[in-house]
Amino acid sequence: MSQATASKVTEGTLTLENIKEIISEKSVELLHLQFVDIEGILKHVTVTAEQLEDVVEGKMMFDGSSIKGFSPINKSDLYLQPDLNTFAVLPWTVEEGYAEARFLCSVANPDGTLFEGDTRNVLKNVVEKVADKGYTISVGPELEFFLFEADEKGTPTAVLHDNAGYFEPSPKDLGERVRLEIYRALKAMGFTIEASHHEVAEGQHEINFKYASALEAADKSTTYKWVVKTIAKKFGLHATFMPKPVFGINGSGMHVNMSFFKDGENAFYDANDKAQLSQTAYQFIAGLMENIKSFTAITNPLVNSYKRLVPGYEAPCYIAWSASNRSALIRIPAKRGVATRVELRCPDPSANPYLAFAVIAAAGLKGIEQGLEAPAPVDADIFHMSEAERKAYGIENLPGSLEASVEALQEGTIGRETLGEHVYGEYVALKKAEWDSYRTAVHTWELVNYQAKF
């Protein structure tokens, strides 16, 4: 690859000619056209590199009725519109004279309009709405994951890969080599990696990549999850972004750091404020707190998500904010100036990042539009407060189950307004069915506690 082309890959300004040059230099034979379903699960169809022109012109059709949350069978023809800036050669496929590459795609109707059931398009709509108010969105997500041993068939077991703790090195941290290979793959695909380390729980890890625009951050989150799972499998391991895979230890979060910029300046920063936060930042925080119960079903979408959001494991379960307090739902990291940001700590990595970032930005924007006033920050350790103390502070709880979250989603307005009628309706139906399946199943805990006793 020429130095000029490599620079454009890093800058994210790829053109069709750049892509043709890379395909030629890397001997790319296959192109994977990727998109996500309503849950954020990655899908793809593979075509030959000779079809690049048709791919770029959006001529690749697929059956939308076979994708969860998409189209009914009588309106199933949909088309893939690749985002050229997401083109990347897959480093684990590169051999002498052969390679594969991918595009992330938006989904379009046969008439060329954006398909309303595509969650990538949902985020695009929110980005446009925020832009209409003069802002751009910057997002820095932090996705944690666990590594489990897999059996000879590649099926995940219940055995964690190591028993190391926070920031521990080798030889206790057995995941260092795995993270190194993940880092190399992500870097080759255009990521800027800022940190890599073992997390608090046994077998738990985190690799942080640089913040980006909302759409790029969601694309990178989707890519990151795919790459982590792919590389882990090459080591005979299973990587999971399940929020709480093991009882009694910390679960995995996806802290979302978000900033709004205006005229090239961070709109959340005010050097003259005591906390160096602008009125816009306070209003954004107020918008999150006002709407958090109504969108938790999106940022924490699984039955299992609510087994992470319990006291004692560092995950926030109380609605409060602070400039430094990690027990609060919303935290303002210490850096100021251009790095000023609001960190929402409840989301988990099972969330569809397109929907999660969309609803967080929409809630914050609503706070700005409505001029909401943020309550006083809570700097005391909320985890160790009594119920009476929390009540005195006016601190409420997040919903305690998927059922309660879906009810709050239906009672509020932020979900329907942000997701649109199609995604909102499909999402609510999907989550109701998930809860009902869980509610009616007989679980191991019930057999252990009841079978012999009664």
Image: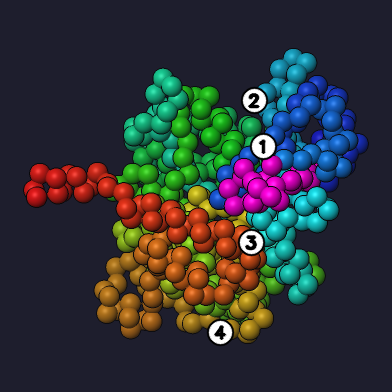
Report, in whole angstroms, how far the alpha carbon at label 2 lies from the one at label 4. Answer: 50 Å
In the picture of the structure, the residue carrying the numbered disc 1 is: 44
Q: Residue furthest top?
A: 96
Q: Quadrant of residue 28?
A: top right
Magenta extent: 63-84
Query: Residue placed at 69% from the left, 50% from the top?
Result: 74
In the picture of the structure, the residue carrying the numbered disc 4 is: 373
Q: Secondary structure at mark 1?
A: strand
Query: Residue placed at 72% from the left, 69% from the top?
Result: 130
Report, in whole angstroms, how far the alpha carbon at label 1 lies from the one at label 3. Answer: 22 Å
In the picture of the structure, the residue carrying the numbered disc 3 is: 422
Q: Quadrant of residue 365?
A: bottom right
User: x, y (%) of residue 99?
Assistant: 74, 23
Inspect the image, locate mark 4, and give the three-letter code of the amino acid beneath it.
Glu
User: Given contact means CB atoms under 8 Å apart, are the residues at marks 1 and 3 in contact?
Assistant: no
Q: Is residue 432 left or right of residue 139?
A: left
Inspect the image, locate mark 3, and give the three-letter code of the amino acid beneath it.
His
